[in-house]
Image (cartoon, rainbow, N blue to C red):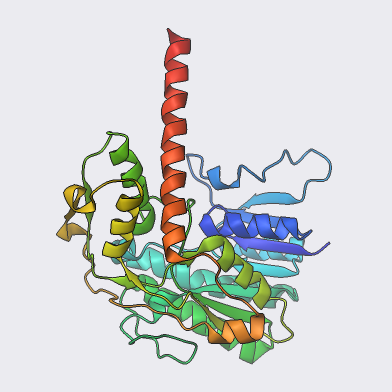
Amino acid sequence: MPTAFITGVSGQDGSYLAELLLAKGYEVHGLLRRASSFNTQRLEPIYKDPHESGVRFFMHYGDLSDSGSLVNLIRDLQPDEIYNLGAQSHVKVSFDVPEYTADATGMGTIRILEALRASGTASRFYQASSSEMFGSSPPPQNESTPFHPRSPYGVAKMFAYWTTVNYREAYGMFASNGILMNHESPRRGETFVSRKITRAVARIKAGIQDRLYLGNLDARRDWGYAPEYVGAMWMMLQQEQPDDFVIATGQSHSVKEFAELAFDHAGLDWERHTLVDPRYYRPSEVDYLLGDASKAKEVLGWEPETSFEDLVRLMVDADVKLLDDELAGRLVRLDRDH
C-alpha cells in the first residue's frame, strides 16, 4: 500500500487530493495546523475514528514553520509521496502579513526538502507552485515564461519553486513543481473572490444580503475545477522523471464575467447588487493570467473537463443548497427549543 503525506490537507486542494489518493488505495497522512476552532470541515467525508479497523487516513499536528515536527513526521512515516500544499495562500492578505507569508509559503518548502535530505527518505515530492509567480508576464504563460510576481505571495511561491528545482538538481531528488492556474470548487475559502461571489449570490437570493463588494472587476484569470487539478498533481509524481508543469484550461475570464454568470444563473441582476470597493484593490495587480497546458497534455495526458460556465453554475448551486440546509437546520433547532 503506497503512503502519501499531504501538507495543507484541510484546504480545498488537500481534501480533494486526500479523497483521490484514498480511492487509489493509498494510506494518507495529513499535516494539520493547531487552531482553537474546528478547521477540518472539508475532511468530514473521509474521516473515520482512528481506532476503527481498516482506517487509511490519519491527521498529525504540525506546522510548516516548525522544522522539528516535519523531520520527525517524515522520518517516522517514510512516505512514498509528499504533496506540499500548505501555505498562506491569500494574495491580498500577503500584503498585510508579508513576513509570515514568506515563512510559511517559501521557507516551509525548504524545511520539508531539508527534512527529506536529513532523514534520507526517498519520497517523491510535489510542490504546489502558483500562476501568481507569472504576475505581469504577458499571456499565454507556460513553463518557459519568465516570472514577474506582483505580491509577497507570488514572491514566496517563486522562492519555493526555485528551491524545488535546486534540490532536484543538487541532490537528485524526485521533486516536481505544479504551476496551477486558479482552480475553484464549492470547497474554496469564502474570502477568495470566486467563492465570495457565489456565496453572496445564494444569500442575496435568500434575502439575507443585499450587496456584494468587489475589487478589480477587470482582472482576468484562467479558472478551472479543483478536483481535476489534484488529479494532475498525482500524475506528475507517477512519471519516470521529475519535471515542472503548467496546469490550466487555456481560457481566461474576468471577475466581472464570473459575477455576471453567477448572478444570472440565480435569476438576479448583478449590476443591481454589486459595488466596487477600492479597499479590495491590491497595491500591485496581476491583470491577465492565461495558461498554456500543452506540455501537461502531451506528457501527462491531462486535460480539463469542466467548462468555466459549468464551474460557476455548480458553485452557485452548491452555495444555494448549503444555505438552504443551514436555514432548515436553524428552523429545526428553533422548533426543538420551543
Give above or below for 135 relative to 3.
below
Which one is nearer the viewer's eye here, 305 or 192?
305
Give the x, y percent position of residue 333: 46, 18
- Left or right: where 179 falls relative to 243: left
Which one is nearer the viewer's eye here, 62 or 314?
314
Give the x, y percent position of residue 160: 50, 77
Which one is nearer the viewer's eye here, 336 or 306?
306
- Left or right: where 318 falls relative to 175: left
Give above or below for 272 relative to 74.
above
State the residue lying farthest toward the top. 338
- Left or right: where 236 falls relative to 121: left
Give above or below for 33 relative to 184.
above
Which one is nearer the viewer's eye here, 249 or 150?
249
Q: Which quadrant of the structure image shows residue 158?
A: bottom left
Residue 64 seen from this side: no
Q: Quadrant of the C terminus?
A: top left
Give the x, y percent position of residue 307: 47, 66
* Residue at 34%, 46% in the rendered image: 266
* Residue at 65%, 80% in the rendered image: 300
Give the x, y percent position of residue 275: 17, 53
Q: Quadrant of the N terminus?
A: bottom right
Residue 315 seen from this side: yes
* Residue at 57%, 61% in the rendered image: 227
* Residue at 34%, 80% in the rendered image: 135
Q: How many marks?
A: 0
